[in-house]
Image (tube, coloured by chain):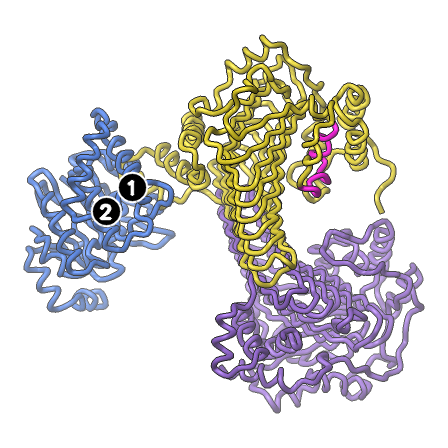
Amino acid sequence: MLEIKNLVVQIEDKRILNGLDLTVNKGEVAAIMGPNGSGKSTLSYVIAGKEDYEVLDGEILLDGQNLLEMEPDQRAAAGVFLAFQYPLEIPGVGTMTFLKAALNAQRKARGQDELSTPDFIKQVNAAAAKLEMPKDMLKRALNVGFSGGEKKRMEILQMALLQPSFCILDETDSGLDIDALRIVSEGVNALRSPDRAFLVITHYQRLLNHIVPDTVHVMHGGRIVRTGGKELALELEANGYADYRESEAA
Amino acid sequence: MADVTLMKTPAESALAQAFESAKNMLPGNAESRAQAFEQFSSRGLPHRRVEEFKYTDLRALLREIAPFANVPSAEEAKAALRESKAFADVSALQVPFVNGHFVREAVDFHNLPEGIEIVPLREALANGHEWLAKLSPVTWASDNPIYQLNTSFMADGVMIRVAGAVETPVHLRFVTAAGSAVATATRVLVVVEDDASVTLLESHESTDGTNHQPNDVMEMIAGDRSNVQHVRLNAEGDKTLALSTLAMKIGGEATFNSINVVAGAATSRHQVYAILDGENTNLRVNGASMLKGSQHSDSTLVVEHNALHCESRELFKTVIDNEATGVFQGKIIVPHHAQKTDGRMMSAALLLAEGGSMNNKPELEIFADDVQCAHGATCGQLDEDLLFYLMARGLPKKDAESLLVQAFLGEAIEFVENESAREALVTTVESWLKARA
Amino acid sequence: MPAVQETIDQVRSIDVDQYKYGFETEVEMEKAPKGLSEDVIRFISAKKGEPEWMLQWRLDAYKRWLTMKEPNWARVSYDKIDYNDIYYYAAPKNNPAPKSLDEVDPEILKTYEKLGIPLREQEILAGVEPQNRVAVDAVFDSVSVATTFKEELKKAGVIFMPISEAIREYPDLVRQYLGTVVPVTDNFFATLNSAVFTDGSFVYVPPGVRCPMELSTYFRINEKNTGQFERTLIIADKGSYVSYLEGCTAPKRDENQLHAAVVELIALDDAEIKYSTVQNWYPGDAHGKGGIYNFVTKRGDCRGKNSVITWTQVETGSAITWKYPSCILRGDNSRGEFYSIAVSNGMQQVDSGTKMIHLGKNTTSRIISKGIAAGKSENTYRGLVSAHRKATGARNFTNCDSLLIGNQCGAHTVPYIESKNSTAVFEHEATTSKISEDQMFYCQQRGLSEEEATALIVNGFVKDVLQQLPMEFAVEAQKLISISLEGSVG
C-alpha cells in the first residue's frame, strides 16, 4: 500500500528525516512512536504534501503511484487522509459547505458524480451521530470556536465521510479527555477494513489501548530505528525513550 | 500661504466650460450651483498632495471630461433597463435611472407602497420644493470636491420620504448605457422618519468599454428609532470612472447598516460620511471589493460620533488580483461630548497575485476619554496553512483559494438582512471568482 | 513591584513645580550674531575649524533652505517662528577648548552634577559596576563640553567624539556617510540643521567590535534665544554592535526655543544599533507659555544584510514634538524596531511616530507605540509602513495604543500602511481607551490614592516599551512619566 524508501527531508536547512524507510500494507494499522522532535509530524506532512518541506532524496509510493509528484489535493483524491494534530479554524467557511466541497472535489477527481444534497446530508448526519457530535457543530464555521476534542472529532467525521484508503492520525489523542478518546477511537476502529491502512502517530501508548496496532515502529533521529508488534508499545511505555537517546549519544 | 495663481489642467478647464454652458439649463437655483463650482475650482481637481486624495489622484486619473448625458428617449430607457441585471431576483419597488436621469414612466406614483413618497428632483429643484431644505444633512461633506462637483452639475434624482415600517425594499437602479462616454450627476435624498424602517438597494451598472463618468450622491436623514438597511452594488463597466458619496445623519436609538460591494469600474471612489447624531445608535458600514486587472478602488470613510453611547462597526474587505490597487481610508472622530462611544474599524486585504497594491489608512481622532475605540488593518496573502488543509481534503488549489476568498468577503456580506439581496451579492462574488479561474 | 513604589514616592515628593531641570546656569557665553545668513554659517564653520568642503556643504544647504517651506501637515499649531530672531551659535567662553575636565568651567560641571549626569570617570567607576559604565558626551548649547571614556573606547577601536572634532580628525569617514541617510534636501528642518548644525556626537564601531559600554549624549539648552541644532552620526560597521542613549533638558523660559536635530544611523552587514532617547526638554508652563519646539529628523539605514536598528523613545518634554525616528530596511533580512512612549500634559502637542520602509527581502519591522494624553494636550501617532515591489517576504507588526486621562485632551492615530508586494504581511492594531474604572476602583479599594492608582496603571500600560530601555534609563523614564502626569487627575 504505502512504501517509503530512503526519505531525506529538510526544512530551512535543518535535516529532519534521514533516510527513512517504511512499509505499510493493506489492512494494516501501523503505529509510529518516538520522542518529541524525532520527525513524526514531519513525516505526516511530507506524505500529505505540505509545501515548506524540501525532499532531498527518496520516494513515497501509494499503490505504486509516486506521491511526491502530486499536489496535496491530488494525494487526497488518491486516498491519503491526514487527521491534523492541530486542525485549522476557517472563519466564514461553513462546516457543511466545506464538507460538501471536499467530498465533491474528491468524487470529481475520481470521475464520480457529485452527491445530491439530500444524500450528502444523510451521510453527514449518520457519521455525526456515530461520533456523538451535537448537530449545531455542523452549523458553525469550520472548527471555529470548537474545543480541542470537538476538532478531533470533526477530523474523524471527515475521514468517515471521505473514505480514504490511507489514513494518517497525527497525535490524534493529544488534548482529548478519556470520553473523547473513546469516541474518537471507536470512530477510527469502525473504519478499519482490509482495504484501508492506518498510520497512527503518537507519543504515548494510551491511544494504542483503544486503536490496537498490528505493527509498532519506533522513530528517532529522522529514521525508523526499531519495528515490532503491539507489545513494543508497552515496552516503550515502561522504559521510555531513554534507550534511544543514549544510543544516539554513544 | 495658498498659491494664488492656479494653473488649470485641461480637465479642469473642460469642467469650467461645461459648467458655463450648462448652468442656466440645469434646474433650480443657479446661484447655489455657482457657489459650489466656485468652491471646487478654487482648489481644482484633488491630487496626491491633498491628504484625502493621497492614494487616489483625481488630477491624474481624470484627464478628459466626458460630456454630460442628455435625457434618454423612452425607448432608450426601456432598452437600457431591460439589459440591467443587478438584484434581478429581489422583489422591490423599482426607482430606475438611465444615463443619470430618473425614468419617471417606470414608477406608478399612485400605487406606491404604504409609507413611501417619491418626489422627482428635477421638478423639485425647478419648483423650489420644501424638502430641498433637507439636502446636505452632513454639512462638512460639502467641503469635498467630488461632492461639490455633484452639487454643481446634479441634473436629476429623487427625494424619498419613508414613514412607518415599509416592507418592500426600494431599489434605486442606475444604468448608464449611452453609446459613447457620458458624465452623469445624480442626487438622491432619503428621509426616514422617526420609528420608520426601510431597505434600500442601490445598483450601478454601465456599458463595458466606454469611459463613463458617473458622480452619484446619496444623502440620508434617519430619524430616531429608525432602521435603515442599505445595500449598494457597484457593477459598473470595465472602463467607467465612478465617484460616489453617501452622507447620512442618524438620530438616536437607530440602527443603520450600509454595505458597498465593488465588482466593477476601472476606477472607483466611494466616500461615506456619517454623523451619529442621537444617543444609543448602532451603525455598521461594510465594504467588500473585488479587484483585478489594473482596477483602482478607493473606500473613504469618516464616522463622527456626535452623541453619547453610540456604537459603530466598520469592516472593509478587499481582494486584489493581478495589478489592481485597493485603498482604504477610514476615520473615526469622537468629540469631547460623545462619551461612552464604542467604535471599531477593520480593514483587511488579500493580495492574490504579484503586482497588486493595498494602501490602508485607518485613523482615530479622539477627544473624549471614556471611550473604547480600536482599528486594525492587515494585508497579506491567503494563509498557506489553510490552503494546505483544504488541499489535503481534496480541494484543488483554485477551489481552495475560491473558498477562502468567499469566506473572507463573506464576513462583510453576511450582515445583509435581506436574504435575496445577500444571495445576489454572494453570486456576484462567485461569478467574480469563476471569471478568475 | 519596587519600581512602582519608587514611582509613587517620587510623585508624592515632588512639589508644585513639576519640571525639576528648569534651572539656569550662569556662564559667560560667546555667540554668533543673531539671525541667519551666510556670514553666520561662515562664522560657525570657522569656529569649528572646518575644512572647506564642510563649509560648502553648509552653504549649499542654506541656499536650498531659503527655497523651502515649513511643513504644516503635522497636527500641531504654533506661532510663526522668526528664524532671524534666534542665535545659531552659543558656546561657553573658554578658549582654547578644554583639554580635560579640570579646564571645564566649574559652573558647567555643576550643571551636569545637578542633572545627575556624571562626567568624571573616576566618580562613575566609584559608584557603579564596571559593566554598567556609560560613556558620556555632554553637549551644552552649541558645543560639546566633555566626552568621557574616550581613551578606553579608542583601545577597542571605537570612535566616540563630538562631530565637530570628527570632521577635523576623520574627515574621510564623516564625508563618506554624512547626509547619506538624511539628505541635505530631506525636509525644512533637516536642511536648516545641515546649514547650521553646531555639535553632536560621532560614533564609528569597526567591523566585528561589540562596543564595550553604553554610549550616551546629554543635551542641554541653557542660553536664551538660542536654537540647538545638533547632528549625530553613528556607523556600525560589519558585524558590530553599539547601544546609544540620549537625554535632553532645558531651563524654564517664557519664550519658545527651537531644537532641530538630525540623527543618522548606518548599520552595515550583520551590525546592530540600539538608539534610546529620554527626551525631557522644558514643556512650557500650564498655560502653554514657553517650552522647546522639538523638530527632529531621525533615520536609520539598515544598509547591510541581517542588520538591526532599534529606536526606543520616551518623550515627556517639549512644547511641541515633531519626530519620526525611521528605518530604511534596505539589506536583506534586516530588522527595524520602534518602541515609543509619548506622554503629553498641559498644553503640549506631540506628533510622533515612525516610518518602516521595507526595500530588501525578508525584512521585518515591529512598532509598539504608547501614547498618553492628559491635561489639554494633543497626542498624535503618525506612522508609515511600506513594502516596495521587491520586498518579498516583508513582515510588520504594529501595535499602537492611546490612553486619555481627562476630557480636555486628544489622542489621534494616523497610520499609513502601503503594500506593493503580495508576499508582504502587515498587521496593524490600535486602540484608544481610558483607565478603566474597575481597575481604578480595585486599586483604590486596596488603599492607593487616585493619583497613585493612575501612576500604577500607566506604568503597566507602558511596560512593553520600558522593557526595551537599559535598566538605569528605564527607572529614570518611569519616574519621568509619573512626574509628567502629575496633576492630571481629579
At label 1, which amino acid type do we have? Thr
Chain B tint as drawn: yellow
Along the line of sight, the residue nearer the viewer: A66 or B346: B346
The circle drawn on residue C469 is none
Q: Image quadrant of residue C326?
A: bottom right
User: How many numbered discs, if any?
Assistant: 2
Q: Residues within 10 Å of mark 2 (few under 14, many from 20)?
A: many
Q: Which residue is mark 1?
A: A95
Along the line of sight, the residue nearer the viewer: C196 or C383: C383
Q: Position of residue B423 (x, y in %)?
A: 40, 30
Along the line of sight, the residue nearer the viewer: C252 or A200: C252
Q: Considering the numbered disc 1 on the image, is that residue within a helix, a strand or a loop?
A: helix
Calculate the distance from the C-alpha at mark 1 to the C-alpha at mark 2.
Answer: 9 Å
**Could you tell me which quadrant the C terminus of chain A lies in?**
bottom left
Output the chain of dot 1: A
Q: Position of residue B2 (x, y in %)?
A: 84, 44
Along the line of sight, the residue nearer the viewer: B335 or C362: B335
The circle drawn on residue A154 is 2
Chain A tint as drawn: blue
Q: Residue drawn 56% across and 29% down?
A: B294
Q: Residue drawn 73% across and 34% down?
A: B148
**Which chain appears purple?**
C
Question: Is A161 positioned to the left or the right of C69 in the image?
Answer: left
At label 2, which amino acid type do we have? Met
Q: Considering the numbered disc 2 on the image, is that residue within a helix, a strand or a loop?
A: helix
Q: Residues within 10 Å of mark 1 (few under 14, many from 20)?
A: many
Q: Which residues are magenta?
A: B138-152
Q: Position of residue B11 (x, y in %)?
A: 75, 26
Can residue A34 be seen here? yes
Most common secondary structure along the magenta stretch: helix
